[in-house]
Amino acid sequence: MKIIAYTDNPTALKNTIDKKINDNELKTWKIVKNDKKEVLYSHTPEQWNEKAMPKPIMFANRIEFEIKWWNEAAPDEATKGYIVGRFVEILMVHFRDKFTQLEIK
């Protein structure tokens, strides 16, 4: 499952998301890194914390936020759906001017 945000400047969108999380403007999200030092976004409420995490993957005209998890046992589809919904919510509320279209796959 992934969210695709089409944008003319994917780097600016990612940097803006990172800044708002780091500045604690998005109080229920945090940045975590995997063993490859790649950024993942974790929803911090206890029932969601580090269960399913959008990982930004950069392309020339978009960012794909692919849902990742720590262990080999994938989260259920409901958990993935909740995280996708919460992340789409922050994109729509806080970053609407940074992308032209969203797609869920």
Image (cartoon, rainbow, N blue to C red):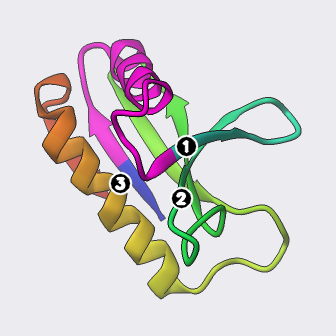
In this view, 35 is above or below 54: above
Where residue 23 appears, x then y in whole percent? 43, 24
SS state under label 1: strand
Amino acid at circle 2 = Thr
SS state under label 2: loop
Q: Residue at x 25, y 43 (%)?
A: 91
Nearest the eye: 89 or 10: 89
| Residue, disc 1 | 30
Tell me, yes or no, whether the two marked residues, 3 and 1, touch with CB atoms within 8 Å: no
- Label 1 Cα neighbours within 10 Å, binned few <14 / some 14-19 / many ≥20: some
Q: Residue at x 40, y 75 (%)?
A: 81
The answer to which quarter of the image holds residue 47 is bottom right
Q: State the separation of the CA atoms marked 2 and 1.
A: 7 Å
Q: Residue at x 50, y 26 (%)?
A: 22
SS state under label 3: helix
Tell me, yes or no, whether the two marked residues, 2 and 1, touch with CB atoms within 8 Å: yes
| Residue, disc 3 | 87
In this view, 85 is above or below 78: above
Badge 3 or badge 1: first in the primary sequence: 1
The tag on residue 44 is 2
Report the magenta residues as a range: 4-29
